[in-house]
Amino acid sequence: MFLIKARNLKKNYGVREIVKGINFSITQGEVLAVIGPNGSGKSTTLEMLVGLRKKDGGEVNYWIQNYKEQIGMQLQSVPFFPGLTALENIRLFAAFYKIYLHKQIAEELLQKCGLLESSNTEATRLSGGQQKRLAIATAMVHNPKLIFLDEPTAALDPLSRQEIHQLILRLYEEGKTVVLTSHDMDEVKKLATRILMISNGEIIAEGSPEQLCNENQVHNLDELYLKLISRKAMVSC
Amino acid sequence: MLNVIFKSMLITSIRDKITLFYSLMFPLILMLGLGLYFDSPDMKLNIVSGVTAISTIFWGMQGIAFQVHFQRNKGVYKLLKLTPMPTISFICVMTAARTVIGLVLNMIVWIIGMVFLKFDLTLTNILITSLLIAVGLLSFTAIGFFIANLANNEGQINMFSNLLQLPMIFMSEAFYKLNSAPNWVVATGKLLPFEHYVKALKGAINGMDDALLLGFLIPLLYMVIAILLSVLTFRWEANGTTIKSRKKLSA
């Protein structure tokens, strides 16, 4: 079942085309990794899908009309309301979704994300890894079907990365659909059931990690990434 | 759900203890300091009403403008945009929360001023003044929200606030009569909410009820206009973060 179908999706910033009419879909129950170089249009694409940015062309079809109530997103910048604890932030964001999150349920959510002990710490004082996990918890307050994670492990230490990987795998096992962006190919290999590779605003590869490696005759995703991105760069030149 | 949001907005303001301290201490020191040097009943009335009104306008306008700017810079409004929460509800709840805290602060200032300057405290003038302060706070806070949407940085918040606050204060009869002022100054002052607000505060103390109606109506009118403008100009992101910088990149 398709959750989102994007057709000819476009975005320009000034004269520069950031997303150049891409077509793709997101299927229920998958972990889709959107990969590509910095500035290739990954985050912009995700932000258009969740309604944070207006698209300049194309169309996006959602499986339901009130899609905002069924989509959660962790942003790269992990923002929280200053002065509020982790628990208070969680309950506040739930209220934005018109949900009264009982303290016990909020604590269960924090426990799921390994943050129960930090529930009364001011969110902005948490460590980088804890803030990322809190941002993921915030994206899950309304129990969405589809969760977007924009570079969930960027700039984190290996232990924090491991904790977030476990959290994502748990979401997958629960049947959630996860779309994530990443520059870490080991992470992509570990988590993704499908890959969407974007370069210079265009999709240059799409498929499961094994399928893409076989088709391109490479041994791993690092090699695949370097091969496809450098090929694309040469074509662009 | 609005009560959870309201409570959270109260907490974010209450935990900023430094701002709370100065918002209370500055008008108190000003009122008590001026009160020591002036004996005339008219001047004492000006002091208690004028300082309370200034406290209201500062807490209302600049307080929320800086808070909204700070939250926007932190990126929380971007997350808010992901939710089905209507912008107008958020603006109204935040304005109401700031108003509640401001009401407590300003009533403390006013009551201490009334006692120190030996005015009679009656249940009627306490009730009327608290209602007036609530309306004044709603009005100036809504204007402050609009300022936060216009300003791109702290400097611009100060600039826009001063641009509105200074004419409001100096073109009013908060501390002096405008009998010898040019007509256009008096006329401009009457177009602004502060003049009516401060007159109504005085009216609540000296029993001149004719000033009360405009003291309620004009600030309420400004509140409605400011909230509408705040909704229309609400920005989810700080300026220069994404779109502008990417435009520069493409140039």
Image (cartoon, rainbow, N blue to C red):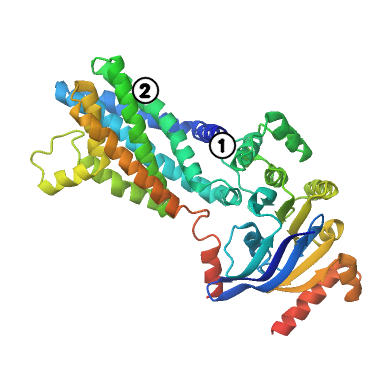
| Residue identifier under label 2 | B108
A203 horizontally vs A170: left or right: left
Q: What's the chain of the residue with tag 1?
A: A
Is disc 2 in contact with disc 1, using a CB cutoff of under 8 Å? no
Q: Residues within 10 Å of mark 1 (few under 14, many from 20)?
A: many
Q: Residues within 10 Å of mark 2 (few under 14, many from 20)?
A: some
B59 horizontally vs A42: left or right: left
What label sits on residue A26 in the rendered view? Answer: none
Judged from the image, the secondary structure of the residue bearing numbered disc 1 is loop
Can residue A36 be spotted in the picture?
no
Looking at the image, which residue is at 48% across and 31% down? Answer: B17
Q: Nearer the viewer, residue B32 or B84?
A: B84
Horizontal and vertical percent for residue B150? 40, 54
Instruction: Classify B247 as above or below B142.
Output: below
Looking at the image, which residue is at 63% across and 60% down? Answer: A47
Looking at the image, which residue is at 64% across and 40% down? Answer: A94
A189 horizontally vs A136: left or right: right
In the image, farthest residue toward the front: A65
Horizontal and vertical percent for residue B248? 52, 70
Instruction: Classify A137 as above or below A203.
Output: above
What label sits on residue A83 in the rendered view? Answer: 1
Q: What's the chain of the residue with tag 2?
A: B
Horizontal and vertical percent for residue B215? 26, 33
Q: Are marks 2 and 1 on the same chain?
A: no
> Residue B139 lies in what quarter of the image?
top left
Amino acid type shown at disc 2 = Ile
Amino acid type shown at disc 1 = Gly
Instruction: Classify B16 as above or below A61.
Output: above
Q: Nearer the viewer, residue B212 or B74?
A: B212
Alpha carbons under labels 2 and 1: distance apart: 24 Å
Horizontal and vertical percent for residue B89? 49, 42
Looking at the image, which residue is at 83% across and 59% down? Answer: A192
